[in-house]
Image (spheres, rainbow, N blue to C red):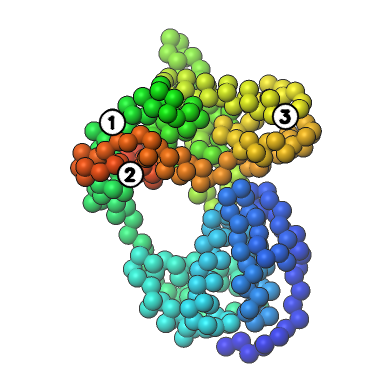
Amino acid sequence: MINSEKINVKYERAIFISRDGREFNINDNSWKLNKNVMVAVKWISRLKSIVELPLKTVLARCAEEYAAETVTGLNNQARRYFNLTGDREFLVDSLIWYRTTLSRDKEQNLSQIRMLVRNWIGWGYPGISQEVHDFLDGLRLRGMEKGKAIKRLDPKNGPLTEIEMSALIDAMLQAYISNKINLSDYTLSATLVYTGRRPIQITSMKIKDICSRKVGEIDEYWINFPRAKQRFSKWRTEFNVYPINEELWRLLTQHILNVSSKVAKLVKFELSAQVIQELPIFPDFSAIREYKDNKSFIAALDSDALHVERDFCNEVMKKMTVLLDVYSERTGQRLNLSTRRFRYTLGSNIAREGKG
């Protein structure tokens, strides 16, 4: 056990830069790590000083190296442990009890605490006893059972059937033709349906990611999707090439023309062809309105500042669920639409074809 109640530890520095390029101050009560993620760290102030200062420093350093969502998980699991145990430092007996509160699917939560502690020790900060480190390091944790909704073909949350997909695609097209949904929502929904990409990949796209070329007599179309869930990769530094059909490509290019035209009207300066290529495909127009000069606007294009938030995809799906009024042949109820279901559907179709 660590007995020191107070210890004179100072932060090695106050300003950190997240992996996604956002500057934050370790002394603030919350840290904005990217467009989508705000990490609240005020709760750490109630811990012992020897734990408080190193813990915040470790989290801040993790924010520089790991995805923002990973840092959120580390922070949330540490907070949950301290809330449940009432402790002000990590203790082996409390960790043993805490493990008993976790179901099989939740036992991996303890692995996030272990990851935090391993970095804590590895970076040489005080506040963790060797006993705690050795206990966590020796744990064998059961992995979370993945793909439950897929395995049992859950009619509400699992992959869509061919009939459901066909009905959905037809309903989307008819809704767009009849002006029930706008071009932006239709384009976003079609991209999600046909590619099964994660929301963060969709919202991180730029105009230059939509590509085409002619090979002999054949036209090829593809999207360079920014990769997601790459632990040490910064925003938009790794990509996957995803082939698409001409129909989706034409829809995307039509949407791009609308986006570039609207952005050009909002800003008070001329946009070069090169700058237009750097525009988000799904921009945050309210953020764009704030930029009054060309220099600051171009600088913002290097970050996620002008892109919509990840939740935008889920908001559109909720809207589409109501507006499209598509029913499932399995449940007789309105089709539940979510970005995850499209990913499940794509994965199930690939598996059915015998591919990895």
Q: Is residue 162 left or right of residue 121?
A: left
User: Residue 253 location, x and y as percent?
Assistant: 52, 21
Q: Quadrant of the N terminus?
A: bottom right
Snapshot quadrant of residue 276: top right
Residue 200 is labelled as none
Q: Find the distance from the CA under tag 2 to the CA under tag 1.
A: 13 Å
Q: Which mark is residue 336?
A: 2
Query: Residue tagged by mark 3?
Result: 267
Disc 1 designates what residue? 167
Nearest the camera: 47 or 4? 47
Farthest residue toward the top?
217
Residue at figure coordinates x 59%, y 67% from the top left: 119
Q: Which of the two labelled residues, at mark 3 and mark 2, occupies the earlier sequence position?
A: 3
Is the C-beta separation of discs 3 and 2 under 8 Å?
Answer: no
The residue under the point 54% across, 52% down is: 231
Query: Seen in the image, is 102 located left or right of residue 64?
Result: left
Q: Secondary structure at mark 1?
A: helix
Residue type of the residue flagged with mark 2: Asn
Looking at the rendered structure, the kind of residue marked 1 is Ala
Q: Quick check: 257 above or below 57? A: above
Q: Give the residue type that dot 3 points to.
A: Val
* Residue at disc 2, secondary structure: loop
